[in-house]
Image (tube, grey):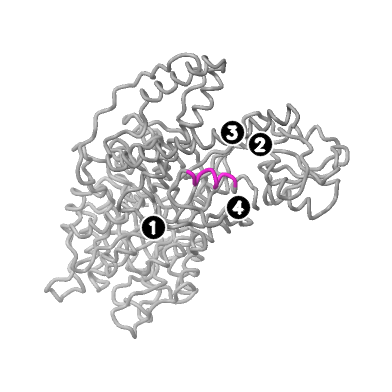
Amino acid sequence: MTPLEDSRAEIDRIDRELIRALAERMEAVRRIAAHKRDNPDVPLRNDEREREVFQVWSEQGRQHGLSPYFIGRILREVLNYSRRDQERVLVREDEPERAARSVRVGYQGAPGAYSDLAIEKLFTSRPQPVKSREGFHTFAAALDALESGEVQYVLLPIENTIAGSINDVYRLLAERRVHVVDEEVWAVEHVLAGLPGATLEDLEIVRSHPVALQQCQVFLGQLVGVTAESHFDTAGSAFSVAEAGDRRIAAICSEEAARRAGLEVLRREVADREHNITRFVLVGLEAERVDARVRARTSLLFTADHRRGALAACLQYFADQGINLCKLESRPLPETPWEYLFYVDLEGNVEDPRLAAALQKLAEHTNHLRVLGCYPDRSVEGGLPEEAAELEVAPAPVAPPPAQPKQGAKEPLVTNVRPDATERAASVVRVGTARIGAPDEFTLILGPCAVENRAQVMEAAEMARDAGAKLLRGGAFKPRSSPYSFQGLGWEGLALLAEAGRAYDLPIVTEVLRPEDVERVAQTADVLQVGARNMQNFALLTELGRVRRPVLLKRGMSATIGELLAAAEYVLAGGNQQVVLCERGIRTFETATRATLDVSAVPVLKARTHLPVIVDPSHAAGRRDLVVPLACAAVAAGADGLIIELHPDPDVALCDKDQALTRRELEALRTRLVPLVAAVGRRLA
C-alpha cells in the first residue's frame, strides 16, 4: 500500500467509528425521548444543557487544534438531528397506530425530484416508516391519490426563497379537504446535466420545471442561443434528456436525479442566488396533534368581512396575544370578484390558550375561517447560532407573556357576547348588493317555491326584481312530506335558477338536502338554504361549515330557539361565519294556519346572537291573504329581511300554490312595507 492509500484506509476506519459513535449517541437520545414522552412536564429542549455541551465540544476541539467554528457547525447538525429523532418518539399513548403503520407518500415529479429527496429527510422525524414513495405528474393528481386512499400523505412545495409562493399549491390547499400535518425545508442545489460527453457549446435546449427555470434566469441568460423549455418536473426533465439521446438537450435538476438518469453534470451552482431553499408541506386527510413542547406553526385560511379595517382587526388579535405572523398571502375569490382569501402562517400551537383566544375573536371579522393545519415548525432549525462558535451563547431576552385567557369549555361562536363579556357587533352577510343584517337596510328574498320550467322561473325572476328583491329564491331539490309530491327538477332546476339570476342580476338562494351535494351546489348557488326538516341534520351542517358560501338556516318545525342556535353553531364551528337565521313558523295545536309564526323569536334571537334574522311568512301562513300582514309584523318585530314565495300563475303551481303571491299581491306587499321599513329606520331598495 502506498502512503496515500494507507491514509485513506485510516480515514475510512475513523469514519466507521464516527458513525458507530453517532448511532450510540442516538440510542441514548431515544431513551431520553422516551422519558420525555412519559413525563410531559419535561421540556423537549434544554438550552442550558446545550450550551454546556457546546462549551465542552469547543474546549476539547481547541485542545486538538480544531476550529471551534467547524466544531460548532457539526454540533448544530447533531443537535438538530437529535431533536427531530425525539419528536418521532413523542407519540401519544392514544396514537400507537401512527407509529405502527408504514405509509405510502405521494409527491409531484419523478424519482430523484427535490420532493422525493425531502420525503426521505422529513420522515426521519416522524413515527411512521415509509413503505413507498409515489411520483405523480401533477400536484392535483397527487392529491387525488390521497383522497382515494392510494397514498396516506402527499408532500407539496409551497414556497421558494427565489421564486416565491407556489400558487397552484395554495389554490389546491384551499379547494381540497386536507390538512397540513408537517413541513420540511430543502436546500435546492441545481445542476446542469447532459448526456455523457456533452459540452456547454453543444447545447440548444435546457429543460426543467418552470419554477427551476425561474430560479436560474441569470445562468440561462449567459447561454447564447439556448432556449429554455418547460417540463413537468426537474427529475423528469433529466430522464427525458436521457431518453432523447441528444447532446443538444440538457436538464436543470438535482445531482441525484442526474445520476439516476445516467447524465453527467456539466455545471454546478446554476441558481441565481446562493441560498435557494424550498419549503414543503406534508398533507394528510386528518389533522394531527403536535406535542406542546415542539416548536409549532399553525396555518389558517380566512376571508375577511368586506369592510374598512376588517383585515387589520383580524391581525391585531394575534398581536394582542403576542403571536408572531410569519406569512400572509392573499388569493382572489373567483366567485366573489375583488374579494380575497387570506393564507396566514403563525408561530404557535393551536392548543395554546393564547392562540385559541385569538382564533375565537378572529371569527368576528371573518366570513369563513379554517385551520388548515398545526404542525412542527422546521423552517428554522433550532441549533446554536453561527456567531456562538467561540463564546457561550447568551439567551435572548424574553418578553413577559401576555395575560392568559380563562380556561374551560370553548365559548359559543353564535352568541352576541364575547368571552370577555363585551357585546359583539351584529354580523352583516353580504350577497351581491344585499347587506343582510345591516342596521340601515331591509332585504327582500323573493321567488318561486320550486323551479318548474324555464319560462316559469324567468317570469318569476322578473317579478322578484320588479318588487325590489335583492336575491332570488327557488327550489331545485324539494323535500316533500309525501313521496308522490313534486320533488323538484334537481340539477337541471338549479341550472335554470342560475340562468334566471344572471338574466335579472339577482344572486340565487336554493336549498341543499345532502352533505355530498354541498360542494357542487355551492359552485352555482350564492346562498345555501337549510330547510326546516334538515335543521338538525348535523352531517349537512358540518359540511356547510366548510364552504365559503352564506347559509340560510331555517328553524325546525318543533325546534326551540336554543336548538336553532345550536344548529347554527355547527356551521360557525366549521369555519363558515356567514349564517342567516330564519323564523318560518313552528308547529302548535293551532290549525287555522299552516304553522304558527313565532314573531317573538325575532327580538329574542336579536338579544342572544349577532347573526342576522329574517322571517318566512309564506310557510308560516300557508295562505297568501295572510302573508302581507305577517310580513308587516316581522318588520315591526325587528327582522332584517323577508323570504317570500311568488308565482306567475299560482293556480298551476306544482308546489305551495296556496301561499304564493301574484304580481298584484306583490305590489300590495311593497306598498305596505315601504312606510313600515322607514319607520324602523331602514330602507327598502
Please tell me in which quadrant of the rendered image residue 348 appears: top left
Tell me if label 1 and label 4 are in contact, CB under 8 Å. Answer: no
Of badges 1 and 3, the one in the foreground is: 3
Which kind of residue does numbered mark 4 sit on?
A: Gln
Task: Give the residue pinned by disc 2.
Answer: 189
Whether residue 243 is situated above or below residue 629 in the rendered picture = above
Distance in Å between CA atoms under marks 2 and 3: 25 Å
Please tell me in which quadrant of the rendered image residue 550 appears: bottom left
Task: Give the residue pinned by disc 3.
Answer: 15
The disc at residue 301 is none
Where is residue 682 drawn, in percent x and y?
Answer: 29, 47
Q: Secondary structure at mark 1?
A: loop
Distance in Å between CA atoms under marks 4 and 3: 36 Å
Tell me if label 4 and label 3 are in contact, CB under 8 Å. Answer: no
In the foreground, 2 or 375 = 2
Magenta residues, as a range? 117-124
N-terminal-most mark, 2 or 3: 3
Where is residue 369 drawn, in percent x and y?
Answer: 38, 47
Of badges 2 and 3, the one in the foreground is: 3
Task: Give the residue pinned by disc 4.
Answer: 108
Tell me, yes or no, whether the highlighted magenta stretch contains residue 122. yes
In the foreground, 306 or 320 = 320
Where is residue 309 drawn, in percent x and y?
Answer: 39, 34
